[in-house]
Amino acid sequence: MLNKLKIQSGIFKGKSLISPSNSTTRSTKSIVQDSFFDTIRDELRAKNFIEVFGGSGIMAATALSNGANHAYAIEIDKSAYKILSNNFALLNSDKITALFGNSLQITPNLISKNAEKSVILYIDPPFNTRENFTNIYEQIWQMLDILDKNKIYLVVIEHISSYDPPQTNGDFIKFKSKKFGKTTLSYFKVIDD
Protein backbone atom coordinates (compact mmCIF):
# COMPACT_ATOMS: atom_id res chain seq x y z
CA MET A 1 0.00 0.00 0.00
CA LEU A 2 1.29 3.44 -0.93
CA ASN A 3 1.71 6.07 1.75
CA LYS A 4 0.15 9.47 1.22
CA LEU A 5 1.62 12.80 2.25
CA LYS A 6 -0.40 15.98 2.58
CA ILE A 7 0.83 19.44 1.70
CA GLN A 8 0.54 21.24 5.05
CA SER A 9 0.34 24.91 4.03
CA GLY A 10 -0.22 27.41 1.25
CA ILE A 11 -2.44 27.35 -1.82
CA PHE A 12 -2.17 23.56 -2.23
CA LYS A 13 -2.81 22.86 1.47
CA GLY A 14 -4.53 19.50 1.96
CA LYS A 15 -3.57 18.13 -1.46
CA SER A 16 -2.26 14.55 -1.18
CA LEU A 17 0.95 13.30 -2.77
CA ILE A 18 2.12 9.68 -2.96
CA SER A 19 5.31 8.72 -1.11
CA PRO A 20 7.72 6.38 -2.90
CA SER A 21 8.89 3.15 -1.27
CA ASN A 22 10.74 3.55 2.04
CA SER A 23 13.44 1.27 0.62
CA THR A 24 14.52 3.97 -1.84
CA THR A 25 13.51 7.26 -0.20
CA ARG A 26 12.81 8.80 3.21
CA SER A 27 10.07 11.37 3.58
CA THR A 28 10.66 14.55 5.54
CA LYS A 29 8.62 14.42 8.75
CA SER A 30 5.70 16.86 9.11
CA ILE A 31 7.29 18.56 12.13
CA VAL A 32 10.47 19.22 10.11
CA GLN A 33 8.46 20.53 7.15
CA ASP A 34 6.45 22.86 9.39
CA SER A 35 9.55 24.24 11.10
CA PHE A 36 11.35 24.80 7.81
CA PHE A 37 8.47 26.60 6.10
CA ASP A 38 7.66 28.64 9.22
CA THR A 39 11.30 29.81 9.09
CA ILE A 40 11.55 30.68 5.38
CA ARG A 41 7.97 31.30 4.19
CA ASP A 42 8.41 35.09 3.92
CA GLU A 43 11.66 34.61 1.98
CA LEU A 44 10.23 32.27 -0.68
CA ARG A 45 8.68 34.92 -2.92
CA ALA A 46 10.63 35.46 -6.15
CA LYS A 47 12.97 32.60 -5.18
CA ASN A 48 13.51 29.32 -7.02
CA PHE A 49 13.45 26.27 -4.78
CA ILE A 50 15.53 23.18 -5.61
CA GLU A 51 14.91 19.95 -3.68
CA VAL A 52 18.01 17.79 -4.06
CA PHE A 53 17.26 14.04 -3.59
CA GLY A 54 13.59 14.75 -4.39
CA GLY A 55 11.73 11.56 -3.41
CA SER A 56 8.02 12.45 -3.38
CA GLY A 57 8.77 16.13 -4.04
CA ILE A 58 6.84 17.18 -0.92
CA MET A 59 9.30 19.97 -0.06
CA ALA A 60 9.32 21.41 -3.60
CA ALA A 61 5.52 21.17 -3.79
CA THR A 62 5.15 22.91 -0.42
CA ALA A 63 7.63 25.61 -1.48
CA LEU A 64 5.53 26.33 -4.57
CA SER A 65 2.38 26.22 -2.45
CA ASN A 66 3.90 28.92 -0.21
CA GLY A 67 4.92 31.34 -2.94
CA ALA A 68 8.17 30.15 -4.55
CA ASN A 69 8.65 31.46 -8.09
CA HIS A 70 9.50 27.97 -9.38
CA ALA A 71 10.22 24.65 -7.66
CA TYR A 72 12.33 21.72 -8.82
CA ALA A 73 12.94 18.24 -7.42
CA ILE A 74 15.68 15.90 -8.64
CA GLU A 75 15.43 12.12 -8.21
CA ILE A 76 17.71 9.31 -9.42
CA ASP A 77 15.56 6.26 -8.58
CA LYS A 78 13.33 5.42 -11.59
CA SER A 79 10.28 4.26 -9.65
CA ALA A 80 10.51 7.19 -7.23
CA TYR A 81 10.91 9.59 -10.18
CA LYS A 82 7.72 8.22 -11.78
CA ILE A 83 5.82 8.91 -8.53
CA LEU A 84 7.47 12.35 -8.26
CA SER A 85 6.38 13.24 -11.81
CA ASN A 86 2.83 12.07 -11.13
CA ASN A 87 2.73 14.07 -7.88
CA PHE A 88 3.74 17.25 -9.71
CA ALA A 89 1.20 16.61 -12.48
CA LEU A 90 -1.52 16.61 -9.78
CA LEU A 91 -0.63 20.23 -8.97
CA ASN A 92 -1.39 21.29 -12.54
CA SER A 93 1.25 24.04 -12.54
CA ASP A 94 3.95 24.96 -15.04
CA LYS A 95 6.01 26.33 -12.14
CA ILE A 96 7.12 22.95 -10.77
CA THR A 97 9.52 20.57 -12.49
CA ALA A 98 10.61 16.99 -11.80
CA LEU A 99 14.09 16.10 -13.06
CA PHE A 100 15.49 12.59 -13.44
CA GLY A 101 19.13 11.87 -12.71
CA ASN A 102 21.99 12.34 -10.29
CA SER A 103 21.19 15.31 -8.05
CA LEU A 104 24.84 16.12 -7.44
CA GLN A 105 25.48 16.39 -11.20
CA ILE A 106 22.26 18.17 -12.21
CA THR A 107 22.16 20.80 -9.44
CA PRO A 108 25.20 22.91 -10.49
CA ASN A 109 23.90 23.33 -14.05
CA LEU A 110 20.37 24.06 -12.83
CA ILE A 111 21.66 26.74 -10.43
CA SER A 112 23.75 28.39 -13.15
CA LYS A 113 20.52 29.21 -15.06
CA ASN A 114 19.10 31.30 -12.20
CA ALA A 115 19.33 34.97 -11.31
CA GLU A 116 21.61 36.33 -8.60
CA LYS A 117 20.65 35.39 -5.00
CA SER A 118 17.51 33.64 -6.24
CA VAL A 119 18.03 29.98 -5.23
CA ILE A 120 16.98 28.21 -2.05
CA LEU A 121 18.65 24.81 -2.08
CA TYR A 122 17.13 22.08 0.11
CA ILE A 123 19.40 19.03 0.37
CA ASP A 124 17.91 15.89 1.91
CA PRO A 125 20.24 12.93 1.30
CA PRO A 126 19.50 9.33 2.32
CA PHE A 127 20.28 8.71 5.99
CA ASN A 128 21.03 5.02 5.44
CA THR A 129 24.06 4.39 3.28
CA ARG A 130 23.11 2.66 0.04
CA GLU A 131 25.00 1.94 -3.14
CA ASN A 132 26.55 5.17 -4.51
CA PHE A 133 25.74 7.03 -1.27
CA THR A 134 28.85 6.30 0.78
CA ASN A 135 30.49 9.53 1.93
CA ILE A 136 27.32 11.37 0.92
CA TYR A 137 28.05 14.46 3.02
CA GLU A 138 31.53 14.79 1.52
CA GLN A 139 29.95 14.50 -1.94
CA ILE A 140 27.46 17.23 -1.05
CA TRP A 141 30.22 19.59 0.08
CA GLN A 142 32.16 18.88 -3.12
CA MET A 143 29.06 19.81 -5.14
CA LEU A 144 28.47 22.97 -3.09
CA ASP A 145 32.09 23.96 -3.69
CA ILE A 146 31.56 24.18 -7.47
CA LEU A 147 28.23 26.03 -7.44
CA ASP A 148 27.92 29.61 -8.64
CA LYS A 149 27.68 31.20 -5.17
CA ASN A 150 26.24 34.43 -6.59
CA LYS A 151 23.02 32.55 -7.40
CA ILE A 152 22.57 31.08 -3.89
CA TYR A 153 20.29 32.72 -1.37
CA LEU A 154 20.14 29.87 1.16
CA VAL A 155 21.26 26.25 1.56
CA VAL A 156 19.52 23.94 4.03
CA ILE A 157 20.73 20.42 4.69
CA GLU A 158 18.38 17.92 6.34
CA HIS A 159 20.74 15.39 7.89
CA ILE A 160 20.97 12.63 10.42
CA SER A 161 21.55 14.23 13.81
CA SER A 162 24.73 12.22 14.42
CA TYR A 163 26.37 14.13 11.54
CA ASP A 164 27.96 17.38 12.69
CA PRO A 165 28.36 19.69 9.69
CA PRO A 166 31.18 22.22 9.79
CA GLN A 167 30.47 25.77 10.99
CA THR A 168 32.14 27.00 7.81
CA ASN A 169 33.02 25.13 4.66
CA GLY A 170 34.43 26.91 1.63
CA ASP A 171 32.16 29.88 0.96
CA PHE A 172 29.38 28.74 3.32
CA ILE A 173 28.73 29.51 6.97
CA LYS A 174 26.19 27.78 9.20
CA PHE A 175 23.96 30.31 10.94
CA LYS A 176 21.20 28.10 12.35
CA SER A 177 20.57 24.51 13.32
CA LYS A 178 17.44 22.79 14.67
CA LYS A 179 17.22 19.20 15.90
CA PHE A 180 14.14 16.96 15.67
CA GLY A 181 15.22 13.66 17.26
CA LYS A 182 17.22 11.75 14.62
CA THR A 183 16.81 14.57 12.08
CA THR A 184 18.50 17.99 12.09
CA LEU A 185 18.12 20.98 9.78
CA SER A 186 21.29 23.04 9.28
CA TYR A 187 20.99 26.41 7.54
CA PHE A 188 23.90 27.90 5.56
CA LYS A 189 24.44 31.17 3.74
CA VAL A 190 27.21 32.34 1.47
CA ILE A 191 29.93 34.22 3.36
CA ASP A 192 29.93 37.86 2.27
CA ASP A 193 33.21 39.13 0.85
Image (tube, helix red, strand yellow):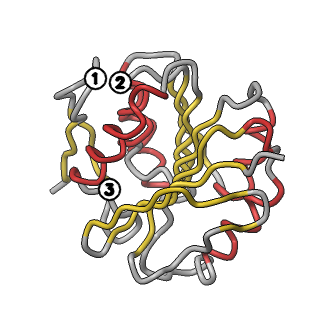
Residue that label 2 marks:
65
Where does the image place residue 125, in percent across and percent down from the top left? 50, 65
Q: Residue at (52%, 53%) from the top-left corner? A: 156
Q: In the figure, is residue 21 to the left or right of 49?
A: left
Residue that label 3 marks:
28
Q: Residue at (48%, 28%) from the top-left corner? A: 43
Task: Confirm or deny contact between disc 2 and disc 3 (CB under 8 A).
Answer: no
Query: Which of marks 3 and 2 precedes in the sequence?
Result: 3
Q: Amino acid at mark 2?
A: Ser
In space, the residues marked 2 and 1 are separated at their CA atoms by 5 Å
Judged from the image, the secondary structure of the residue bearing numbered disc 3 is loop
Which residue of the protein is positioned furthest toward the front in this rendering?
Answer: 193
Mark sitting on residue 10: 1
Task: Confirm or deny contact between disc 1 and disc 3 (CB under 8 A).
Answer: no
Query: Which of marks 1 and 2 precedes in the sequence?
Result: 1
Depth check: give the residue in front, 137 or 79.
137
Where does the image place residue 42, in percent across and percent down from the top left? 42, 25
